[in-house]
Image (cartoon, rainbow, N blue to C red):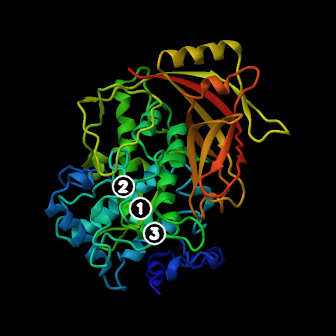
């Protein structure tokens, strides 16, 4: 029923509704899936300078005052209470996300997941969402969404959990019980160590994707955290399925944190020589344009180019990125206890120094998972990097996942009975399954470098599902090694 409002915004004659069949068997807990019309079209284009509000910081949810939490709750409550004749309703916002992704299959080539549209599209979506919430509480100028900095706060912020009923507009019933009761995220997902590793990626293609492949941030931390919160197999819970994910209020705090991650990555460009950490300049990237509803229910459109300078154009900022100045063992897996924010003397982040080395993957018929082949010179450089306490990064491109598998996979170095953790990738409901876009995966091989480069009996790279048994072949088109030294 509510879908009708999308039709209002569609160009005449474009009423072809894309296959409702995609949703067979994926109706989450009685929720009505979007009927998947095309997204709204022909919106008034955003122009730089039109937003003249003050520049206000988005802050960690853990730093909001009681009054700010109350305002956040009130904003979500007002959104949920809008009449179904409104163009801004809670369900329309959530469905807007579905319409642009594989879950609705509207335009796979330009999907906002698994491509370089991932960061700019979500930034644009959240910008209009934030404006709608701000105007609903009469505070368009100063209201900004908080982020859930999972790298510091290892369990879901309690404002989203308790009270665990519908009097709390931030509550969602469709969450895993561990997370829903205040439990911590799995120890490897969305950690500070993972973010440090991602900061060693100097090029956007690897970090944020290309026209045809998703970047390392999507593989981890974006996807695993979705799957950690919502059931990613039938009957699907909100965060575990792209078609429903934005029906969980935590979605917006999760994506603000990813947006902050992108912001902080770009900020490294200030300290890098030669210049790195730059967004793509390809017109095909910059000219991507999407339509949304604004706080006045009007259809508006905005391009990737418009959102790159979020401070000037979209009027929000993030706290200056800092890092703990205590020792950063490059491969230590952070196991911060739940609800404890990391607080240590902080210094402004500086870009690491990165060198790239050729390698190749060798598959064998008889063994599950490839081994890495490098020249003697590369092997010596890698082992020296380990001794120097630098980070050994593996970049895998064109990674495809086993068909019909969903959920979270740990990528392990397997050497006989010795297994070492390299990284994680996850499949969110109806994303990779509908569209086998290859993805880029970045791993931390520092601890396992000896095993992986052992000339006589090298360790294999294997995918181990967190649920269920067995292991899977990891397939990738190519591999490269990067040695990262933190300044
Ligand atoms: Cu568009 Cu986190 O998904």
- Are discs 1 and 2 less than 8 Å apart at CB? yes
Is residue 442 or residue 291 the one in the foreground?
442
Disc 1 versus disc 3: distance between alpha carbons? Answer: 26 Å
Number of dots carrying numbers: 3
Q: Position of residue 378 (x, y in %)?
A: 64, 16
Residue tagged 2? 155
Q: Tell me whether the residue at label 3 lies in contact with that at label 2, contact meaning CB atoms closer than 8 angstroms.
A: no
- Indicate left or right for 452 with 73 as reference: right
Residue 408 shows in this picture: yes
At a point 39% along the width and 37% down the height, the residue shown is 265
Local packing at callout 3 (Cα closer than 10 Å; few below 14, some 14-19, many 20+) is many
Regarding mark 3 in the picture, which secondary structure is present there?
Answer: helix
The nearer-to-camera label among 1 and 3 is: 1
Q: Which residue is mark 1?
A: 179
Q: Is residue 23 above or below residue 327?
A: below
> Quick check: 63 left or right of 89?
left
Sequence-earlier tag: 3 or 2:
3
Instruction: Looking at the picture, tell me which residue is in the foreground, 389 or 487.
Output: 389
Cα gap from disc 1 to disc 2, whole angstroms: 7 Å
Q: Does residue 41 appear anywhere in the picture?
A: no
**Apparent side of residue 481 relative to residue 139 in the rendered image (left or right):** right
Task: Name the quadrant of the C terminus.
Answer: top left
Q: Nearer the viewer, mark 3 or mark 2?
A: 2
- The answer to whether the residue bearing label 2 lies less than 8 angstroms from the nearest atom of ligand 1 is no
Q: Position of residue 164 (x, y in %)?
A: 32, 73
- State the mark number for residue 96: 3
Q: Position of residue 58 (x, y in %)?
A: 25, 51
């Amino acid at each position: 029923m509510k879908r009708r409002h999308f039709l209002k915004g569609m160009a005449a004659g474009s009423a072809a509704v894309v296959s409702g069949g995609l949703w067979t068997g994926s109706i989450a807990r009685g929720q009505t899936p979007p009927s998947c019309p095309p997204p709204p079209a022909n919106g008034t284009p955003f122009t730089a300078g039109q937003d003249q509000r003050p520049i206000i910081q988005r802050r960690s949810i853990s730093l909001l005052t009681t009054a700010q939490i109350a305002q956040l709750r009130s904003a979500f409550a007002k959104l949920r209470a809008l009449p179904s004749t409104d163009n801004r309703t809670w369900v329309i916002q959530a469905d807007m996300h579905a319409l642009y992704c594989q879950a609705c299959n509207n335009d796979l080539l330009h999907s906002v997941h698994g491509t370089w549209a991932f960061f700019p599209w979500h930034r644009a979506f959240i910008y209009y969402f934030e404006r709608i919430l701000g105007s609903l509480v009469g505070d368009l100028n100063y209201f900004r969404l908080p982020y859930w900095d999972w790298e510091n706060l290892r369990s879901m912020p309690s404002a989203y959990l308790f009270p665990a009923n519908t009097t709390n507009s931030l509550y969602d019933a469709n969450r895993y019980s561990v997370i829903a009761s205040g439990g911590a995220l799995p120890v490897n997902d969305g950690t500070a160590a993972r973010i440090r590793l991602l900061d060693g990626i100097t090029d956007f293609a690897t970090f944020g994707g290309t026209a045809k492949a998703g970047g390392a941030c999507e593989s981890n931390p974006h996807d695993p955290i979705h799957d950690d919160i919502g059931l990613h197999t039938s009957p699907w819970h909100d965060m575990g399925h792209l078609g429903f994910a934005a029906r969980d209020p935590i979605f917006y705090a999760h994506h603000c944190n990813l947006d902050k991650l992108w912001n902080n990555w770009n900020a490294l460009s200030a300290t890098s020589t030669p210049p790195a950490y730059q967004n793509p300049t390809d017109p095909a990237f910059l000219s991507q344009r999407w339509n949304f509803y604004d706080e006045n229910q009007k259809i508006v459109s905005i391009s990737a180019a418009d959102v790159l300078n979020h401070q000037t154009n979209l009027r929000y900022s993030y706290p200056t990125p800092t890092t703990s100045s205590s020792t950063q063992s490059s491969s230590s897996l952070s196991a911060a206890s739940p609800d404890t924010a990391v607080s240590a003397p902080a210094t402004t982040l500086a870009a690491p120094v990165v060198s790239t080395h050729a390698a190749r993957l060798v598959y064998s018929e008889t063994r599950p998972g490839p081994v890495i082949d490098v020249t003697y010179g590369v092997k010596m450089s890698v082992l020296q990097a380990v001794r120097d306490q630098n980070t050994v990064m593996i970049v895998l491109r064109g990674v495809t996942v086993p068909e019909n598998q969903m959920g979270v996979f740990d990528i392990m170095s397997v050497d006989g009975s010795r297994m070492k953790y390299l990284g994680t990738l996850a499949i969110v409901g109806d994303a990779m399954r509908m569209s086998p876009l290859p993805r880029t995966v970045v791993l931390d091989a520092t601890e396992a470098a000896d095993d992986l480069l052992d000339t006589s009996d090298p360790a294999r790279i294997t995918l181990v599902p967190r649920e269920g048994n067995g292991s899977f072949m990891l397939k990738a088109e190519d591999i490269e090694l990067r040695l990262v030294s933190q300044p």
